[in-house]
Amino acid sequence: MDRDSLKLYLVTNSTGFTEEEFLEKLEGAIQGGVTFVQIREKERSTREYIDIVSKALEITRKYNVPLVVDDRVDVVLATGADGVHVGQEDMPVSVARKILGDDKIVGATTKTVEQALEAYKQGADYLGVGAIYPTTTKVKTVLTSTDTLKDICNAVPIPANAIGGLNKDNLGVLKGCPIAGICVVTAIMKAQSSKKAAEELIQAIDEL
């Protein structure tokens, strides 16, 4: 897994957007510097999920940006997406790996060194670690300290990204953490211009 591709990782949230607006936001974000996309659609039916991922893939492929699907291995298989991202309550990494094979990306969310080591052992390609700050996207937020984030980065040989309430103004807390990049939802999806928001985030990451 190429560390550089994780530099600015967008987790999408299409709530409140028409499909056209959502896809425009996605393309703008990639034009602004997003290097990796995870489509996360908790509320959609399977058919709608497959449809939106297929349309998003047309955009990400154009820019050569990997696209993974949150939680749903069936949607990955149905659309040919680049992989899946699983949380601690989703399908185990080892099962996702077995179903998808070695050519697909499998990412995992972890909050502790133990979880990180387990995900690595089971075949994860990268980790999302957090939440660093409280988030508006998930109600139950368990916060992860930057010390734990550093410990996780040092414990596993696969790249790790910080996630949770991050925006261009609060990345300073990550200084000195050997992360591959950051994951954001609101900082891009709620911005007036997703392209400008992504550009500002890239600048803030570079300043780290």
Image: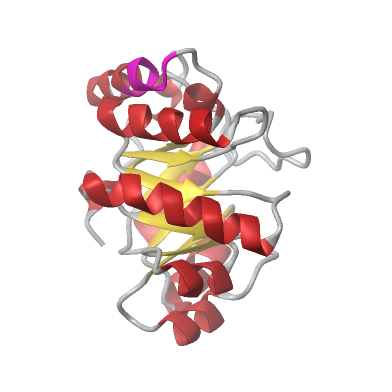
Front residue (pair 104, 92): 104
Residue 104 percent coordinates (x, y): 35, 72
Residue 21 percent coordinates (x, y): 51, 28
Residue 106, magenta (yes or no) = no
Residue 163 percent coordinates (x, y): 51, 39
Q: Residue at x 71, y 58 (%)?
A: 45
Q: Quadrant of residue 194?
A: top left
Residue 157 visible in this rendered orientation of the protein: yes
Q: Residue at x 35, y 24 (%)?
A: 198
Q: Residue at x 77, y 42 (%)?
A: 140
Please give the range of residues in magenta: 193-198
Say whether residue 23 is left or right of residue 138: left
Counting labels gives 0
Say whether residue 84 is left or right of residue 91: left
Whether 39 is drawn above or below 191: the answer is below
Front residue (pair 3, 37): 37
Taken as a whole, is the magenta stretch helix, strand or loop?
Answer: helix
| Quadrant housing the C terminus | top left
Front residue (pair 5, 195): 195
Tell me how the rendering is colored: secondary structure
Front residue (pair 20, 174): 20
